[in-house]
Image (spheres, helix red, strand yellow):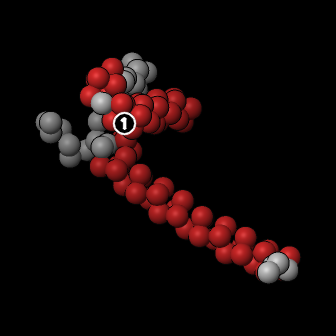
């Protein structure tokens, strides 16, 4: 049975809301992890941070592919992010922590 356009529009709107909620949950999850790792304390240009995240995503995507190929693929896919332009900023109350 064919759906009328109004039903399809309603379904699209509902799915868009679900997508927005899922993206928000993922953003909050990744944000919490980034803050725990100390990224909130680093002074870095947004484009540089985006590049670092892109590299990290490529690394983990290649690990996913490597895990399907076996351990040899995984060992060769470990990349590194250039951190030479990242500047650490001292945070009050954190001196001496490792």
The residue lying toward the viewer, choosing from 61 and 21, is 61
Q: Residue at x 65, y 70 (%)?
A: 15
Q: Quadrant of residue 84?
A: top left
Q: From the viewer's perspective, is residue 6 above or below residue 75?
A: below
Residue furthest out toward the front: 1
Q: Quadrant of residue 80?
A: top left
Q: Is residue 51 visible?
A: yes
Percent across and percent down for residue 66 are: 36, 31
* Left or right of 94 in this view: 58: right
Q: From the viewer's perspective, is residue 80 above or below residue 50?
A: above
Q: Residue at x 37, y 46 (%)?
A: 34
The residue lying toward the viewer, choosing from 40 and 54, is 54
Q: From the viewer's perspective, is residue 49 above or below residue 21?
A: above
Percent across and percent down for residue 89 are: 34, 34
Q: Residue at x 46, y 57 (%)?
A: 26
Identify the residue position indicated by label 1 in the image. Answer: 68
* Left or right of 80 in this view: 48: right
Quarter in which the N terminus is drawn? bottom right
* Left or right of 26 in this view: 70: left
Q: Secondary structure at mark 1?
A: helix
Quarter in which the C terminus is drawn? top left
The residue lying toward the viewer, choosing from 19 and 77, is 77
The residue lying toward the viewer, choosing from 95 and 60, is 60
* Left or right of 85 in this view: 33: left
Residue furthest out toward the right: 5
**In this figure, what is the number of numbered marks?**
1
* Neighbourhood count class around disc 1 (C-alpha, 10 Å): few under 14, some 14–19, many 20 upward: few
Q: Residue at x 55, y 68 (%)?
A: 21
Percent across and percent down for residue 78 are: 33, 25
């Amino acid at each position: 049975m064919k759906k009328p356009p109004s039903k399809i529009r309603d379904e699209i709107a509902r799915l868009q809301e679900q997508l927005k909620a899922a993206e928000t949950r993922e953003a909050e999850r990744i944000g919490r992890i980034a803050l725990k790792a100390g990224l909130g304390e680093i002074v870095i240009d947004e484009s540089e941070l985006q590049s670092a995240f892109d590299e990290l995503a490529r690394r983990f995507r290649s690990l996913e592919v490597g895990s399907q190929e076996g351990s040899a693929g995984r060992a060769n896919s470990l990349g590194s992010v250039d951190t030479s332009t990242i500047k650490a900023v001292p945070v009050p109350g954190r001196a001496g922590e490792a």
